[in-house]
Image (cartoon, rainbow, N blue to C red):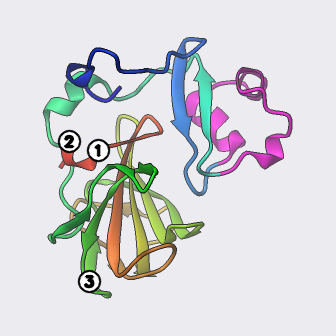
Amino acid sequence: INNINKIKPGQTTKVLPVKGILYKISPGENLSSITDKFNISLNKIIASNLINNPNRVQPGDTLILPGAKPEFGYRDRLEKVFTKPVYARISSYFGRRWGRMHEGIDYAVPSGSKVKASGEGRVVYSGWARGYGKTIIIEHQKGMRTLYAHNSKLIVNTGDRVSKGDLIAKSGNTGNTTGPNVHFEVQVNGRPVDPLSYI
């Protein structure tokens, strides 16, 4: 639940069977890096998620992380923490689209447009991601990440530190797209949220 004020009568919600958080695995992550990040034993994650083969866990999967605490809370949302990666028309919004969840927003821009970091942080992934094409993921404070996809050229590398407004990529049409655009996601504690609540 991203905003408790948006809960409506009759709405279905998920309740975890244990104390912890739901976490979506990003490109460049694996079980080992997640156990290190949240200081949770691998055996606990395997048991809580009924994982038969740890080697088959991949980016895009969602895990229950038992005992993990959110780094970013509801009160933190009162302040807009990010800037737009590009200034352009939004062609697709966060939410259900074509029967599935669209986990970010798309900006309609010509190929080669400058894509800038929405906030200060460390590049934790710079490379190709299935469906996303050439992708950059930046890790910020308080368990927040931003993702920039469908680029034609990646300017920064994994491990680089960036400041808000730094050039990180050139937009493009790589991966699964219907045309040139910048797909932008905000993830809080490993879960995609509506970017418009944070920019």
Return the disc, 1 or 3, that comes first in the chain's sequence: 3
Q: Which residue is drawn at 43% across and 20% down?
A: 13
Quadrant location, the N terminus: top left
Instruction: Compute the Cα span from label 1 to label 3.
Output: 23 Å
From the viewer's side, name the closer residue of 28 and 37. 28
Q: Which amino acid does label 2 sit on?
A: Ser
Measured from the top left, where is residue 137 in percent x and y?
A: 44, 58
**Residue 102 in the figure: left or right of residue 38:** left
Dominant secondary structure, magenta: helix
Measured from the top left, where is residue 140 in percent x and y?
A: 36, 46
Circle 2 packing at 10 Å, graded few (<14), some (14-19), many (20+), is some
Circle 1 packing at 10 Å, graded few (<14), some (14-19), many (20+), is many
- For label 1, the SS is loop
The residue identified by callout 1 is: 194
**Residue 111 in the figure: left or right of residue 38:** left
- For label 2, the SS is helix
The residue identified by callout 3 is: 113
Instruction: Compute the Cα span from label 2 to label 3.
Output: 24 Å
Residue at far top of view: 18
Measured from the top left, where is residue 104 in percent x and y?
A: 35, 54
Circle 3 packing at 10 Å, graded few (<14), some (14-19), many (20+), is some
The residue identified by callout 2 is: 197
In the image, is residue 56 part of the stretch drawn in magenta? yes
Q: Which amino acid does label 3 sit on?
A: Ser
Q: Is residue 86 above or below residue 41?
A: below
Q: Residue at x 58, y 45 (%)?
A: 25
Q: Is residue 47 above or below residue 113?
A: above
From the viewer's side, name the closer residue of 69 and 64. 64
Q: Which residue is drawn at 26% across and 79% down?
A: 114
The stretch in magenta equals 30-58
